Image: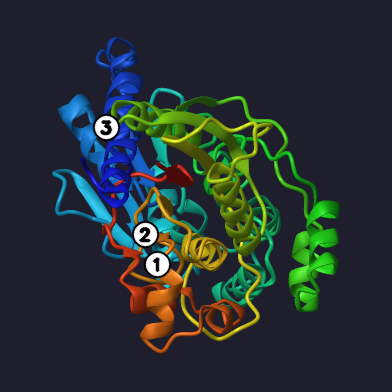
Amino acid sequence: MNTLREDAFSMIQESINAVMPEVAVEEALRSKIDTWKDRTGNLVVIAIGKAAWNMAATAKEILGSLITDGLVVTKYEHAKGEIDGFEIIEAGHPIPDENSVKGAMRAIELVKDLNEDDQVVLLISGGGSAVFEKPVEGVTIQDLTIITDQLLSCGADIVEINTIRKHLSDVKAGRFAMHCKNTPIYSVVLSDVVGDRLDSIASGPAYPDETTSEMALDLVEKYSIFVGAHVREALTVETPKELSNVETVITGNVKRLCESAAKSAQQLGYKPVILTTTLDCEAKEAGRFMASIAKELKSDNAFSAYPKAPCAIIVGGETVVHVTGKGAGGRSQELVLAAAIGIENLEDVTIFAVGSDGTDGPTDAAGGIVDGESAIMMRESGVDPDQYLRNNDAYRALNGSGDLIVTGPTGTNVNDLMVILCR
């Protein structure tokens, strides 16, 4: 019989494989080949986000010589080599940098002279908000860096962060589609946003914006974000609310990630329960809640709503971290560190949390995996888990107990998977 940890890693691998973009992108593009193969105009493929390389490689395989120009804009170390006919630009994430602007400017250059006889294929994945950026006139990339850093530290969720960033960008909130003028755009989207909000995934470069200037300004006040007068003025300019040249299809999301985890768990002999696919709260609070569920699973409570062991309680979504300390980590790591404290000495229970993209915060880890021995091992290595949690130092705490999950970039990005395995 496998250990709980062995089963956990099997679930992680199978779940992520199920949401790799290749199959879904192939299906989305093959449905259009007959429409595009006889056209006389250009076909430009632009892929942005953490999964951009995989999506572009699939597009090249399917569309081949139909592609006249190609561009990949992705996170550093996420490109896996050259793609014939594609320019590849790697840029900053989660904080945009000069290469983010370079990627956006190159995309604008590729589409500025197109017309209604041409075709743009836009392949979008999470992370596009940072790696693909061009500030509006009067705002600098340094302004965006400072604002994004404040938003990430204060506990704002991804929709709130993007609400502000969209109003400061010349390529977000449908504004990239405006650069394409009347050129038709076929947008294939891999969702990393809870609820699949198309105006928030990569900040909706080719989708009408549902947020308003008033909402952006309210968030600045809510989180006490420092912005200069020029930035505040830029936030008052409204984003596009209608686009007539875009067709959009979603190819993958966290729901499919959780369903794949449930299927894998069942094959391994567990009774799976998908508790939610829309988790959106503080990471440490989510970890404490999952620890409380684990205790319930191991109790003799006859009225428990959860199945008896062996079972797998599956959660999908995206938590946030309110940074008050000076440590290193990410939301999945902080979640499992809080869970480790809650399940200390509990037997036959394992809890893991992993980012489907393979990166969790500004670290090389994808997440973490803990059990009843983890907090004990941390203390034996000289780590006080409570103190490290307060200092937002989950990476070092989990490293001390050997509980980090390191996958490297996976090539996909559809939120986070969090699971309790119980025997």
Q: In the shown orientation, is residue 174 left or right of residue 256? A: right
Residue 55: x percent and y percent? 30, 38
Q: In the shown orientation, is residue 170 left or right of residue 271? A: right
N-terminal-most mark, 3 or 1: 3
Crowding near pointer 3: few (<14 within 10 Å), some, many (20+)? many
Crowding near pointer 1: few (<14 within 10 Å), some, many (20+)? some
- 420 or 52, nearer to the observer: 420
- 73 or 377, nearer to the observer: 377
Whether tag 2 and tag 3 are in contact, CB under 8 A, the answer is no
At x 48%, y 74%, the residue is 394
Say if 74 sits above or below 19 in the image. Answer: below
Identify the element where label 3 is drawn.
helix
Q: Nearer the viewer, mark 2 or mark 1?
A: 1
Looking at the picture, which amino acid does disc 3 mark? Answer: Glu
Q: Which residue corresponds to mark 1?
A: 373
Q: How many marks?
A: 3
Residue 203: x percent and y percent? 58, 48
Q: Which residue corresponds to mark 2?
A: 366
Q: Which residue corresponds to mark 3?
A: 22
- 155 or 232, nearer to the observer: 155
N-terminal-most mark, 2 or 1: 2
The answer to whether residue 31 is visible is yes
On the rendered image, what quadrant is the N terminus found in?
top left
User: Which labelled disc corresponds to residue 321?
Assistant: none
Looking at the picture, which amino acid does disc 1 mark? Answer: Glu
Identify the element where label 2 is drawn.
loop
At x 33%, y 13%, the residue is 31
